[in-house]
Amino acid sequence: MRHFNYKNGELYAEDVPLRDIAAKTGTPVYIYSTATLERHFNVFTQAFAGRKALVAYSVKANSNLGVLATLSKMGAGADVVSGGELARALSAGIPSTKIVFSGVGKTRPEMDMALKAGIKVFNVESLAELHVLNERAGVMKLKAPIAFRVNPDVSAGGHEKISTGKAENKFGIAWSRAQAAYAEAAKLPHIEIIGVDVHIGSQITELTPFKAAIEKVGGLIKRLRAQGHNIKSFDVGGGLGIPYNSDNDVPPGPDAYGRLVKQLTADMEIELIFEPGRMIAGNAGVLLSRVIYVKQGEDRKFAILDAAMNDLIRPALYDAYHEIEPVMQTTSDLRSLYDVVGPVCETGDTFAKQRSLPDLKADDLVVFHSAGAYGAVLSSQYNTRPLIPEVMVNGAEFSVIRQRPSLEDMLSLESMPDWLSATHNAV
Ligand code: LLP
């Protein structure tokens, strides 16, 4: 059940009419539902009841401090991929002992930050990284807890830009080199092996790829243990898909995913770690936008919105589908086909082509559903469009959790080169 529903002919987020938020913050604006975030987190954790499991929310999906604090309060850990995300997770109150650090290019300063914080585990992706981590931990007279992220060469299906578990992808330790990597790590004085990690991709809509990856990595864990490595945790990553199109998407739910993972790991005596991002945040958010103009083209109608590809890039980048709905329900059955576009000067600034929608006119409010994950975090200021505000709803209350910067704020980070400054030539 989602918490964006029509009541009395208009769309609400929980008990707040979206119209009220638009009136307060202007549009476009991202809106997140606390109840949905909580529900998704609960459903996911309950799927692993009875097992030792850490749900490390993947911060990259939506890193707003309000979202992180909501999940932190429920006991979530965090999967971070940069020093910036680590700082966010810590500042939202997520304990360092529940933070896992992933990514192929961790820098020395990022490692230092994470070592100082005392995170749970570094998911190491290359031998080069392993040696640098050993050196940094040595300087700090510590042992760095590590798991290798292994690349199981399993196809996750879905869009090629978000597949990560194939041999040709940059991620993880090559499958044929994994055992040697553990042998090498075991020799290093400032490294402590604690587990194995795998993540094969995102928006995965079948269980088969998870099954293949977990079976393959399960075999590796057995071999590593037989070789004397103390493998205490198995991080199975994130990637569980969500319904974007309520008419025809039926990805497996967390319960089915949970049953599969529990069954495949039943005899392992191991702590499970999960890194779900989209599953938690995706359907907990909408992007609210206003129609600026409706234009009749040669052979089609364009609905030109005030949101653009810089605010929500998923359609332009991955041909992603987002459901679009008007905020006010109409009594008439009239519908038209629209190309739904933004004001940015690129043809790629197209959210949907020939989408059937109730008749739209200027000033109408519309929402993009399933925009809570990989929405705000992927936005930019292209065309000098300010980053848009983010709002969190909780029951009948709402709060602005990120302000729209003013144009002065945006310009203030830039300065003239010395040779163009007024005083330069006067000297
Ligand atoms: N763990 C690792 C190591 C990851 O790389 C990712 C996502 C996750 C966990 C979380 O995956 P999720 O549960 O959210 O599928 N921008 C793309 C998605 C990129 C995913 C990147 N990695 C999109 O908008 O579809």
Image: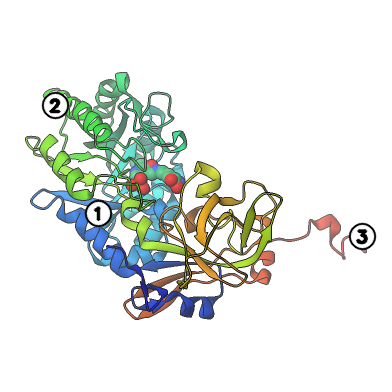
Q: Are marks 1 and 2 in contact (CB under 8 Å)?
A: no
Whether residue 252 sits left or right of residue 10 in the image: it is left
105 shown above or below 127 = below
Tag 2, which secondary structure? helix
Residue 302 in picture, x, y percent from top left: 63, 56
Quickly name the residue at label 1.
97
Residue type, numbered disc 3 = Asn
Quickly name the residue at label 3.
425
Tag 3, which secondary structure? loop
Q: Is residue 101 visible?
A: no
Q: Quadrant of residue 397?
A: bottom left
Query: Could you say which is closer to the camera, residue 351 or residue 95?
Result: 351
Mark 1 or mark 3, which is nearer to you? 1
The image quadrant where one finds the C terminus is: bottom right
- Point out the residue furthest to the front here: 333
Q: Quadrant of residue 16?
A: bottom left
Whether residue 373 sits left or right of residue 340 in the image: it is left
**Separation of residues labelled 1 and 2 (CA atoms):** 26 Å
**Separation of residues labelled 1 and 3 (CA atoms):** 56 Å
